[in-house]
Image (cartoon, grey):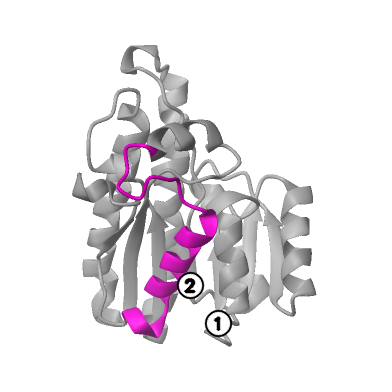
Amino acid sequence: MSATTTLVTGATSGIGRATAIRLAELGSHVVLSGRDRERGEAAVAQIRDAGGRADFLVADLRDENGARRLAREAIRLGGKVDILVNNAGVYPFAATHEVTGEQYDAVYDINVRVPFFLVAELAPAMAERGDGAIVNVSTMVAGFGMPGAALYGSSKAAVVLLTKAWAAEYGPAGVRVNAVSPGPTLTEGAVGFAGSLAGTLPAGRAADPREIADAIAFLISDRASFVHGAVLPVDGGRLAV
């Protein structure tokens, strides 16, 4: 993974931060993006202190222009982007009749529109070089119904379909596109409900963000060279029950 540049969105905390740290350990120059400059710079400092290469870009991703701007800034920093991890997302839980139009738009803008246009901006250059990897972060609730998860789950179900469509579109040119489907994970914003969901899993616990990061690192690596369009469950066995 050396001599590669990776863009990780939503990288100031949780799964995104763990992924950025893991990929830097594997030798990639990691460009982290997020809204919180202080947390982003702290993550970069941690990576650099460990001997890795990292930069941070402030990005409040909400629309096509923001996504394309971030992609171009990442290219400016790294010369190119070889790997994209679409991690940034929001996960509000609410009954359908309580969701406002503004909330609906915000979820689909961040969870669907932004990954779509990041790929639109970055995948063609990967295809032209004949090499690249994209990993999208979905969720286990994209695959089954859960009360209160209609908005969030449907947005991530769209990401699952996009993963397969992009694999079909860019795979022949050497760009591998896959996704991970995490179960409850002990991130800063999800500790409460992650713990309550953990009891429903065969694993009997919630995930550490580093476990999701390791799955992402596998999908990016040459060990997954024959894996295209897959959605890897990292859900503590939820798929089995």
Callout 1 environment at 10 Å: few (<14), some (14 to 19), or many (20+)? some
Mark closest to the chain's N terminus, 2 or 1: 1
Q: Secondary structure at mark 1?
A: loop
Q: Secondary structure at mark 2?
A: strand
Q: Amino acid at mark 2?
A: Ile
Q: How many numbered discs, if any?
A: 2
User: Picture coordinates of residue 60 (x, y %)?
Assistant: 62, 44
Nearer the observer, 133 or 74 = 133
Circles 2 and 1 in contact, beta carbons < 8 Å: yes
What's the magenta region? 199-224
**Vertical arrangement, residue 180 with respect to residue 37, above or below:** below
Residue 223 magenta: yes
Callout 2 environment at 10 Å: few (<14), some (14 to 19), or many (20+)? many
Residue to which mark 1 is pinned: 4
User: Picture coordinates of residue 218 (x, y %)?
Assistant: 41, 74
Question: What residue lies at 25% left-to-right and 72% top-to-bottom?
Answer: 228
Left or right of 17? Residue 53 is right
- Distance from label 2 to label 1 (Cα)? 7 Å
User: Picture coordinates of residue 82 (x, y %)?
Assistant: 49, 77
Residue to which mark 2 is pinned: 83
User: Picture coordinates of residue 15 (x, y %)?
Assistant: 53, 54
